[in-house]
Image (cartoon, helix red, strand yellow):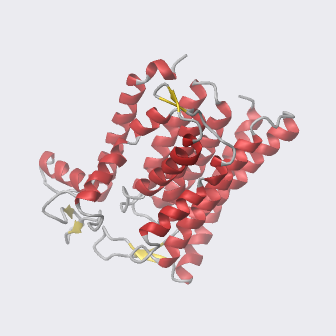
């Protein structure tokens, strides 16, 4: 890869990195802040910081298009790339509305589903992906039905596994890194570059979002990361692999349905800052992580960073397993 193609990564990182401190101050000033629920004092932390990530991503992707157009004299994938940007912009806007309304109120489930389906239209209208499903050509059902379902499912469920400093961001970095690497290996380098641009922006955000968080991502970012996972699966024709990588989120969805989508992921915070199970039963991977850590740690004390680490470790194990299972479709 020519050195000039590294420019979008640096632009995405630095635009995100330098805009986040400004957002933190402005968001607090206008009251766009929420309590850090897994802390004793429940400090107010700026919300919806994912806006900076999206801004950095869009700027970086447009710079990549400019490089392809003016330096390499290529317009081969521009329609596809612009459709990706369109989806992310729409998804981010939907998430930002949710953030402004507040996570306790937010959009209703039905309205959210309709809006997320609308966000898939840029992919539908260009008829992206392959319509073969398990050897059967399903024709228009793929763009008209499966693409919207993929965007809705990935965006909504990625938002379930959340609420702990750095969790959503680190999960996005891990999953998108794996998918981006695969797209390079299967010969779709342009898609891998788009994926790594998002990763560069997420790394910048993680610096401020890791424990102790100075800013929260908000739905504006969690919806966008989920959508990006679906986008890479669709454009890369690696739906099975992406679905396997999404196992933690499938499990999280099952746990959340067990609680009828009413049980929260937050823990019960003790005076020493350690975490306890908030319910008698497990209603999320976060609760399961606390339960496991309390069983294996001699001190029986569990802290927020450890919960995030264990969930990320599980995600990495799932991804490594996926590379082994699908190796024939990944490695040339």
Q: How many marks?
A: 0
- Residue 55 vertical placement versus 67 (above, below): below
Most foreground residue, 28 or 62: 62
**Residue 320 as seen in the image, left or right of residue 139:** left
Query: In this orientation, does residue 229 appear?
Result: no
Q: Residue at x 36, y 63 (%)?
A: 163
Most foreground residue, 150 or 64: 150
- The x and y percentages for residue 127 are 66, 41
Furthest residue in direction bottom, as rendered = 30
Q: Residue at x 50, y 58 (%)?
A: 223
Q: Residue at x 62, y 71 (%)?
A: 22
Query: In this orientation, does residue 10 appear?
Result: yes
Most foreground residue, 102 or 155: 155
Q: Residue at x 62, y 61 (%)?
A: 90
- The x and y percentages for residue 221 are 52, 59
- The x and y percentages for residue 205 are 54, 57
Q: Quadrant of the N terminus?
A: top right
- Residue 322 vertical placement versus 54 (above, below): above
Q: Quadrant of the C terminus?
A: top right
**Residue 105 as seen in the image, left or right of residue 27:** left
- The x and y percentages for residue 313 are 33, 41
Most foreground residue, 263 or 141: 141
């Amino acid at each position: 890869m020519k050195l000039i193609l590294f420019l979008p990564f640096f632009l995405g990182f630095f635009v995100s990195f330098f805009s986040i401190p400004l957002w933190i101050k402005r968001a607090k000033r206008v009251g766009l802040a929420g309590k850090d629920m897994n802390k004793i004092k429940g400090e107010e932390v700026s919300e919806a910081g994912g806006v900076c990530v999206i801004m950095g991503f869009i700027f970086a992707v447009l710079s990549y298009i400019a490089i392809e157009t003016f330096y390499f004299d290529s317009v081969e994938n521009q329609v596809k790339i612009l459709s990706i940007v369109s989806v992310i912009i729409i998804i981010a806007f939907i998430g930002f509305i949710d953030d402004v309304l507040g996570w306790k109120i937010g959009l209703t489930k039905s309205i959210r589903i309709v809006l997320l389906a609308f966000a898939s239209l840029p992919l539908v209208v260009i008829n992206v992906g392959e319509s073969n499903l398990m050897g059967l050509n399903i024709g228009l059902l793929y763009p008209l039905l499966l693409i919207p379902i993929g965007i809705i499912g990935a965006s909504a469920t990625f938002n379930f596994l959340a609420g702990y400093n750095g969790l959503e961001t680190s999960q996005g970095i891990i999953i998108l890194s794996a998918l981006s690497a695969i797209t390079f290996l299967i010969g779709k380098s342009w898609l891998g570059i788009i994926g790594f641009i998002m990763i560069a922006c997420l790394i910048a955000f993680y610096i401020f979002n890791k424990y102790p968080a100075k800013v929260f991502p908000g739905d504006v970012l969690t919806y966008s990361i989920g959508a990006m996972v679906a986008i890479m699966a669709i454009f890369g024709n690696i739906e099975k692999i992406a679905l396997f990588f999404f196992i933690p989120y499938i499990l999280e969805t099952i746990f959340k349905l067990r609680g009828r989508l009413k049980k929260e992921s937050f823990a019960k915070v003790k005076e020493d800052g350690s975490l306890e199970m908030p319910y008698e039963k497990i209603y999320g991977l976060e609760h399961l992580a606390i339960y496991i850590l309390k069983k294996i740690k001699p001190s029986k004390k569990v802290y927020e960073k450890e919960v995030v680490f264990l969930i990320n470790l599980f995600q990495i194990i799932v991804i490594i397993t996926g590379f082994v299972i699908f190796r024939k479709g990944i490695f040339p």
